């Protein structure tokens, strides 16, 4: 199959995804989800999906906003480390559930540390991040040093 840049082929659809992304950002802010947690969720969803473009982008964003290299180094195995709070663990678990769509549904992340509005906002974040990963992977966005 020929590599096709989805955004260039259907720019109005791409712009619709951009608008949805902005609405999700507003929902996250309204739900008072920490911006560093937003980046961690974007990174974890991108790890699960194998999206190098988004991994590089959001790792750089996280570092620029004060995230530690140690936490970024272990986010792929967040459940095995003591670097993340219960709240962060719940958000990362929820994002993985939305990304993997485990059947039957796993709710091991649901320890009550996320409010209903945070569960909704983080679920939307994972949904949109999954879409962005698929756009980047399908379009074969270059990722080089």
Image (spheres, helix red, strand yellow):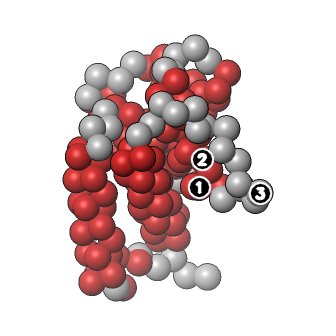
Foreground: 142 or 38?
38
Vertical arrangement, residue 139 with respect to residue 27, above or below:
below
Is residue 35 found left or right of 89 in the rendered image?
Answer: left
Q: Mark 1 and mark 2: span between their CA atoms? A: 5 Å
Rendered location of residue 25, percent (x, y): 27, 52
Visible in this render: residue 26?
Answer: yes
Single out the residue that lies furthest toward the top. 82
Q: Which residue is mark 1?
A: 99
Q: Are marks 1 and 2 in contact (CB under 8 Å)?
A: yes
Q: Viewer-nearest of labels 1 and 3?
A: 3
Q: Mark 2 and mark 3: span between their CA atoms? A: 14 Å
Q: Which residue is mark 3?
A: 104
Vertical arrangement, residue 83 with respect to residue 102, above or below:
above
Residue at 52 percent across and 24 percent down: it is 86
Would you call the spot at circle 1 few (<14 residues within 10 Å), some (14-19), or many (20 or more)? some
Q: Which residue is mark 2?
A: 96
Foreground: 142 or 91?
91
Q: How many marks?
A: 3
Q: Quadrant of the N terminus?
A: bottom right
Q: At numbered mark 3, what does the secondary structure look like: helix, strand or loop?
A: loop
Residue at 42 percent across and 47 percent down: it is 116
Disc number placed over residue 1 in the picture, else none: none
Visible in this render: residue 143?
Answer: no
Would you call the spot at circle 2 few (<14 residues within 10 Å), some (14-19), or many (20 or more)? many
Residue at 54 percent across and 30 percent down: it is 89
Residue at 62 percent across and 18 percent down: it is 81
């Amino acid at each position: 199959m020929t590599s096709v840049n989805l955004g260039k082929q259907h720019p109005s659809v791409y712009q619709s995804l951009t608008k949805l992304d902005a609405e999700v950002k507003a929902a996250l802010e309204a739900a008072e989800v920490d911006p560093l947690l937003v980046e961690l969720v974007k990174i974890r969803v991108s790890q699960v999906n194998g999206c190098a473009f988004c991994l590089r982008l959001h790792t750089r964003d996280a570092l620029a906003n004060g995230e530690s290299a140690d936490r970024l180094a272990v986010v792929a195995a967040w459940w095995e480390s003591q670097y993340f709070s219960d709240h962060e663990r719940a958000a990362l678990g929820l994002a993985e559930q939305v990304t993997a769509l485990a059947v039957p549904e796993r709710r091991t992340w649901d320890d009550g540390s996320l409010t209903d509005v945070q569960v909704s906002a983080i679920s939307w974040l994972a949904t949109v991040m999954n879409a962005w990963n698929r756009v980047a992977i399908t379009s074969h966005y270059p990722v080089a040093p």
